[in-house]
Image (tube, helix red, strand yellow):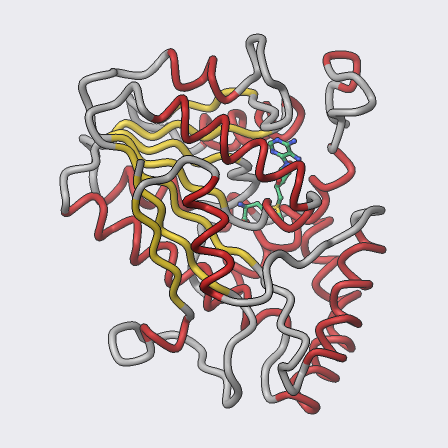
């Protein structure tokens, strides 16, 4: 259970946390995670969604898991690229049961890695990481992206970091749980707070509303399934890459690059789909 007493009902989105069990299991099942992050709930959710995945694979040549894997591979690649560029402070918001932080700390012990999530999920992750003897500089911190102030806000988390270091923020599997107005407010607040660092970058995936896409009707089905699973909506954001880029510029980012998984097919060994992909990767610098 999340520590609901610490959140008011408007900002309590702990109903979404169940999805972290599912994705945590997908990462593990595909060799991208440590067994430590597998939960019985994640395994059960995988089997519950299996028929849906088989159906999508047959109809559109790619399943929900294909799109999850694609985003995860590309985000990992973009994070590695940022580390090569000298980003040595990384904040992963809504990190859930992903083992990205653990793996990055294994590969780059010098990187300072902070995993933020709602209090309940953050406590659970802290316990799992402690059992793996987490390294110094690998922090878990309660954070609610909707809190505009207070100890769980993004602002407070960033205030605790080294202001002399190039800093990267990542979110994965988070932004489409909120309507565009709500998440844009978060992005604007983030862009302001990021200006305190010599260089700062935000990386996320966004699922756009591609109504002309040949698979759009199946996307609507998947959207309903995810919404049912997490007891809420799963709105799609922006109708084109250009609109998405413009939105991030208006939210206060200075340089914005929007790409699709197929832009990386020649570089990364990851699952591909025969049709144009349904997810976009955004790299936004302040
Ligand atoms: C689909 S999971 C993604 C987890 C992980 N990033 C991954 O890709 O496996 C969504 C995550 O968002 C977190 N979350 C939901 N609402 C949040 C909020 N308001 N602030 C911060 N994290 C939130 C949940 O606890 C959960 O861990």
Left or right: where 274 falls relative to 52: left
Residue 144 is situated, as x and y percent measured from the top left of the image, at: 61, 25
The residue nearer to you, when weighing 173 against 200, is 200
Residue 245 is situated, as x and y percent measured from the top left of the image, at: 43, 55
The residue nearer to you, when weighing 21 against 195, is 195
Residue 58 is situated, as x and y percent measured from the top left of the image, at: 68, 91
> Residue drawn 28% across and 33% down?
200
The residue nearer to you, when weighing 80 against 163, is 163
Residue 147 sits above or below residue 73 on the image: above
* Rendering quarter of residue 57: bottom right
Left or right: where 126 falls relative to 260: right
Residue 129 sits above or below residue 253 on the image: above
Residue 241 is situated, as x and y percent measured from the top left of the image, at: 47, 65
> Residue drawn 59% across and 66% down?
239
Ligand 1 image-quadrant field: top right
The residue nearer to you, when weighing 132 against 81, is 81
> Residue drawn 40% across and 22% down?
193
């Amino acid at each position: 259970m999340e520590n609901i007493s610490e959140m008011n009902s408007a900002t309590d989105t702990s109903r979404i946390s169940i999805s972290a069990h599912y994705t945590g299991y997908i990462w593990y099942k595909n060799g991208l995670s440590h067994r430590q992050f597998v939960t019985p709930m994640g395994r059960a959710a995988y089997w519950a969604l299996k028929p849906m995945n088989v159906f999508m694979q047959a109809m559109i040549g790619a399943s929900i898991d294909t799109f999850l894997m694609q985003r995860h591979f590309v985000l990992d690649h973009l994070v590695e690229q940022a580390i090569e560029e000298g980003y040595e402070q990384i904040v992963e918001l809504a990190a859930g049961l992903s083992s990205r932080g653990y793996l990055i700390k294994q590969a780059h012990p010098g990187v300072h890695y902070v995993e933020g999530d709602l209090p309940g999920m953050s406590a659970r992750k802290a316990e799992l990481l402690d059992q793996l003897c987490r390294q110094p500089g690998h922090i878990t911190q309660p954070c609610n992206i909707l809190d505009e102030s207070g100890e769980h806000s993004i602002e407070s988390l960033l205030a605790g970091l080294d202001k002399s270091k190039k800093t990267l923020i990542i979110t994965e599997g988070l932004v489409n749980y909120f309507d565009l107005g709500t998440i844009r407010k978060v992005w604007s607040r983030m862009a302001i707070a990021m200006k305190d660092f010599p260089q700062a970058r935000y990386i996320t995936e966004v699922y756009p509303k591609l109504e002309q896409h040949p698979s759009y009707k199946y996307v609507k089905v998947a959207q309903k399934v995810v919404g049912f699973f997490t007891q809420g909506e799963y709105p799609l954001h922006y109708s084109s890459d250009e609109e998405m880029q413009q939105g991030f510029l208006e939210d206060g980012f200075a340089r914005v690059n929007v790409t699709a998984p197929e832009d990386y097919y020649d570089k990364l060994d990851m699952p591909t789909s025969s049709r144009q992909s349904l997810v976009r990767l955004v790299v936004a610098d302040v």
